[in-house]
Structure formats: C-alpha cells, structure tokens
C-alpha cells in the first residue's frame, strides 16, 4: 500500500520534494546493508561458538584419554580423571549449546523489532503523506473520500499490529470467561470480515461446513477464537501471492472435536520449518513475499489460544510453491 500511496501522491502533490525521496532511498539502502552485515555477524558468532565448543570438548577428551593412559595402573586416579574430564566436556557442550540458543533468540528478537518498526512506520508515513496532500492542495471530493478510506485502512493496519503485540504479551496463562458459542457462525463472520478487508470475491475465499449431522457448539472465549481464526485467514491470504485461492473447511471429525482447515495455493513452507512457524517471533527464511510484512506473532497466538481451549494446531505443506494447509482442532461441546 505504501508504494501505491507514494506513486499516487508524489505525482499529484507538491508536499514531498526530491530531497525527501533521495533521503528515503538512502535510508532504505543503508538499513538494508546494515541488516545484511548484521546477519553475517550473527552467523559468524554462531560458527565461532560452535567451533570453539567442539575444539574445547575434543581437547578435554584428548587430555582425559592421555591421563587415563598415563595412569592406567592407578585405579582411583583413572576413575577421578575420567569423571573430572567428562564433567568438563559436558559443561563445555552445554555452555556452547546455551550460547548458540541465546544468539538465535536475539536474532529473532531483532527481526521482530525490525518488523514491528516497519509495520508501524509504513502506515504512519502513508497517513502523513495523505494529510500533507489535503493540507497543501485542492482535491476533488471523490479523491478526498478515497484518501479518507485509505487512511482508515492504514489506521486499521496500525491497530492490528498493536493488538497483536499486546495479545502476545498476554499470552501467558490467565483465566477468562468462557461461554458456549456456535463456532460455525464465528468462522463465517471472520471469513466475511477478511473478504471485506482484502476486497475479495466469495470464490477467492470460500467457506464450507460439513457437520455430519452434528452441531458446531464449543465452549470458549469469543475474542480469542476470533483472533485465532482471523490470523489463520490473514496468513493464507497474504501468502497466496498474486492470485488468492483460499479454501476454509469446518468439519466434525468425530463426536468430540471440530476441525477447521485453511488451505491456500501460495508460496508453501519447507517441510523442515512446519513446526517452527508456531514459535514466537519466528518467520520462515526466504518465504516472505516482497510486499508481505509481519511480526512473527500470528501463528504463535493461534497455537497459544488452541492450547488454552484444549485443542491443537498444525501445518501441512508439500514444499515451497505448493501451498499450505493449517488445521485448528478444538473440543466440541457434548450433544
């Protein structure tokens, strides 16, 4: 949206000059180069600590063997030496593993900060550009209404980002009131809201319910369940690419659970990443499309909400470029 805003307004409004555009391009270039070198630096740190740990562990094992060979006739010394050097080697391995995990966590945290910064800055810059145009130029009523609509879209995007971060911060265990609700109606409302948000036709985002003669009543928190379903739909639409083709199916797997499957035909996920996508801040490397940004919190919230309601969530994909199906299972109320 920001590219469309800039191209539309820079040609019509005189509020943004060449210096601003040059400065923006220079900032983008410098930030991209900085992120590139930061990624190289983090990989070098991981490689360094792994190599150091392996070398130290190998050295301790070698010293231990040397000690054993030199003192093989002294049973007590041999036993103490083996225990001592074994403890050293174990400590080195554990310490190296801890350091590598911490480096990776810091990398995910930095990636999250960069993503949130972008998600906040882009709509703010867009709204500011529209307001500058309305302030400095005469705009036709139709164009003015279009500006208002786009600014509201950007404000909704800001609100969604803030809500995702706040909900992730409240993801720990806490008690909320649960009520009996019709999950079919809730999913239908989320589908309709997503269609309106992305301006999709019904055939682009389809919803089908197969009850097998059973109902779709569950017990849960409506707000949390709406968040989970909306995040699944949002991900499917964003990663569908240029042509959105998303199928949403709600079925009654058996008498005890409901199964919601959201399938797209988009960029897909490598098999080795299918479990990692539900971790906090995690984003699949090289999966993100140029126009797609995110915080890495959406699927993490889905998993948290599913567990809180006694259910589970999992993803399936045949590989990159072959689409993804994410399935949410929740316990159904007894008939």
Image (cartoon, helix red, strand yellow):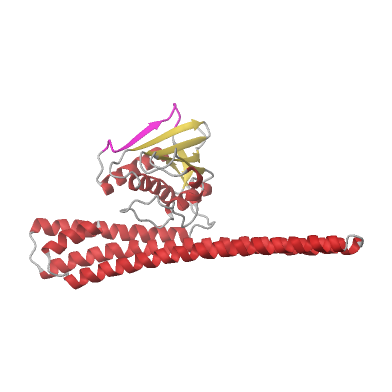
Q: Is residue 28 left or right of residue 163?
A: left
The residue under the point 46% across, 63% down is 40
In this rendering, does residue 83 appear at all? no
The residue under the point 51% across, 64% down is 44
Residue 282 percent across, percent down from the top left: 46, 55
The residue under the point 12% across, 62% down is 11
Q: Is residue 138 left or right of residue 228?
A: left
Quadrant in the picture for residue 260: top left
Residue 130 percent across, percent down from the top left: 18, 64
Query: Nearest the camera: 117 or 164?
Result: 117
The residue under the point 28% across, 60% down is 155
Q: Is residue 315 left or right of residue 14?
A: right
Which residues, given as a range, are shown in magenta? 202-215
Residue 206 percent across, percent down from the top left: 32, 36
Against 229, is 213 above or below? Answer: above
Against 40, is 179 above or below? Answer: above
Q: Residue furthest bottom?
A: 19
Query: Nearest the camera: 15 or 213?
Result: 15
- In the rendered image, which quarter contains the N terminus? bottom left
Asked if the stretch drawn in magenta spans residue 94, the answer is no
Asked if the stretch drawn in magenta spans residue 203, the answer is yes
In this rendering, does residue 68 appear at all? yes
């Amino acid at each position: 949206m920001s590219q469309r805003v800039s191209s539309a307004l820079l040609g019509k409004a005189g509020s943004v000059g060449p210096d601003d555009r040059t400065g923006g391009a220079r900032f983008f270039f410098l930030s991209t180069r900085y992120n590139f070198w930061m990624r190289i630096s983090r990989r070098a740190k991981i490689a360094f600590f792994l190599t150091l740990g392996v070398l130290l562990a190998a050295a301790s094992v070698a010293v231990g063997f040397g000690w054993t060979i030199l003192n093989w006739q002294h049973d007590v010394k041999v036993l103490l030496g083996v225990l001592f050097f074994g403890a050293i080697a174990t400590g080195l391995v554990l310490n190296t593993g801890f350091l590598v995990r911490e480096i990776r966590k810091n990398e995910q945290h930095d990636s999250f900060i960069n993503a949130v910064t972008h998600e906040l800055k882009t709509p703010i810059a867009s709204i500011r550009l529209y307001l500058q145009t309305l302030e400095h130029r005469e705009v036709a009523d139709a164009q003015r209404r279009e500006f208002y609509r786009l600014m509201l879209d950007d404000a909704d995007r800001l609100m969604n980002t803030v809500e995702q971060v706040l909900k992730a911060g409240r993801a720990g265990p806490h008690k909320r009131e649960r009520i009996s609700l019709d999950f079919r109606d809730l999913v239908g409302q989320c589908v309709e809201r997503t269609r309106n948000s992305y301006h999709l036709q019904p055939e682009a985002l389809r919803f089908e319910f197969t009850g097998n003669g059973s109902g779709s009543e569950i017990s849960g928190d409506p707000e949390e369940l709406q968040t989970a379903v909306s995040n699944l739909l949002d991900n499917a639409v964003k990663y569908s690419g240029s042509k959105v083709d998303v199928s949403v199916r709600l079925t009654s797997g058996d008498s005890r659970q409901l199964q919601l499957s959201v399938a797209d035909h988009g960029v897909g996920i490598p098999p080795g990443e299918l479990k990692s996508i539900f971790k906090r801040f995690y984003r699949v490397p090289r999966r993100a499309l140029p126009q797609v940004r995110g915080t890495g919190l959406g699927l993490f919230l889905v998993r948290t909400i599913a567990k809180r309601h006694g259910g589970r969530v999992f993803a399936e994909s045949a590989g990159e470029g072959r689409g993804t199906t994410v399935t949410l299972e929740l316990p159904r109320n007894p008939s």
